[in-house]
Amino acid sequence: MAWDRICRVVVRTPVGPGGGNYTEVDLTALDVDFSITRSRVFNDNEAKLNIYNAAPDFIRRVLQRGSNLLIYAGYKDEGEGLVYQGNIVGVNSIKTGTDVVTSVMAMSLRSLDKPFTSTPVVLNFEPGATAEDVVIEIGTRLGLVPIGANNVKGIEFPQGWAFVGPVGLAIERIGRDIMVHGYGLYIDLAELVVYSTQADSDYTLAYLHYGAGLLSIKDTTDYIAAARGRIEEMGQTKRTTKGKGKNKKVIISTEASKDVYSELEKVFTSLKKTLSAQTLMMPKVRPNSLVQIDTPEHSGLFVVDHMTIQGGNYAGAAFVMDLELLEA
């Protein structure tokens, strides 16, 4: 891999009615690159994967609509992280020069006719299965990225673990099972998150500066829109009534007499800043992550509102993240 990167793509297809049964194909032997879009809005959770020169039989056999697509990225000295999990919705191959490029479109799917937590599931794990197995399987069924599932890989179920019913109740049950071991479980907008109840989470904060992953940063705060909005408010007419009967007077006034400069200063002081930043690939950063910015131009605590991840497993492929940040 270029520059000690890790980039791994896995296609997983459930087999049979029970939980935990699937066929899995690792695409590491093929050249791939990808672009992922994620945000705090669940619908913004899509990926496009390009596979170069895959055999037609492989495409037909492995890249099936509905199969689970998992993309891992990271570095050899730090390990890999799951940066995307979704479902294949489309596959298209075209010839470009000497290459055949197969584009795989994926998105995280939920039930369209009822709340996804009401989706019925049948889960049946053999004795010795772990809580990590259960969390990952539930995440797979819902198209949710399981964050921190490895934290509970040491929690075993000697008698196995089985459940039949709405997946939301399955989540509640496994949540109770891991709570006694000091862990909690909740659904984020696009993730199934396991967190420690006894210590700080590894996934809560990223510290970014030019010596630690940050490549560029720009202030994207819309000061003009904020100023225009306040000036329009100051120019709006207000009707007030004084007195009664014949002495009744209607007074029409505006706030235009106020000091515009001081009013705008109040607006800018209270306005939440937005930044756009590009960083090296950082697998633990995701929508809703807290980011501490420390640069000569900008500093403070921000939340990841939207992100685009680009990566690949061949020399010359991008390995970066573009973040849209909102002041916390």
Image (cartoon, rainbow, N blue to C red):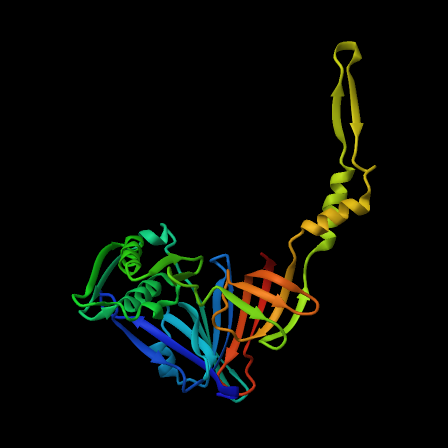
Q: Is residue 163 left or right of residue 277?
A: left
Between 319 and 296, the one lying in front of the other is: 296
- Tally of numbered tags: 0
Residue 86 percent coordinates (x, y): 41, 67
Residue 274 percent coordinates (x, y): 64, 59
Q: Residue at x 51, y 87 (%)?
A: 2
Q: Is residue 271 left or right of residue 279?
A: right
| Most distant residue in the front direction | 198
Q: Is residue 125 left or right of residue 189?
A: left
| Image-quadrant location for residue 132 | bottom left
| Most distant residue in the left direction | 159
Q: Residue at x 77, y 32 (%)?
A: 237
Residue 53 percent coordinates (x, y): 45, 86
Q: Is residue 67 visible?
A: no
Q: Residue at x 63, y 65 (%)?
A: 276
| Image-quadrant location for residue 8 | bottom left
Between 93 and 261, the one lying in front of the other is: 261
Residue 101 percent coordinates (x, y): 49, 81
Q: Residue at x 50, y 56 (%)?
A: 41
| Most distant residue in the bottom direction | 98
In which quadrant will I find the C terminus? bottom right
Between 2 and 97, the one lying in front of the other is: 2
Q: Is residue 80 left or right of residue 282?
A: left
Q: Is residue 65 visible?
A: yes
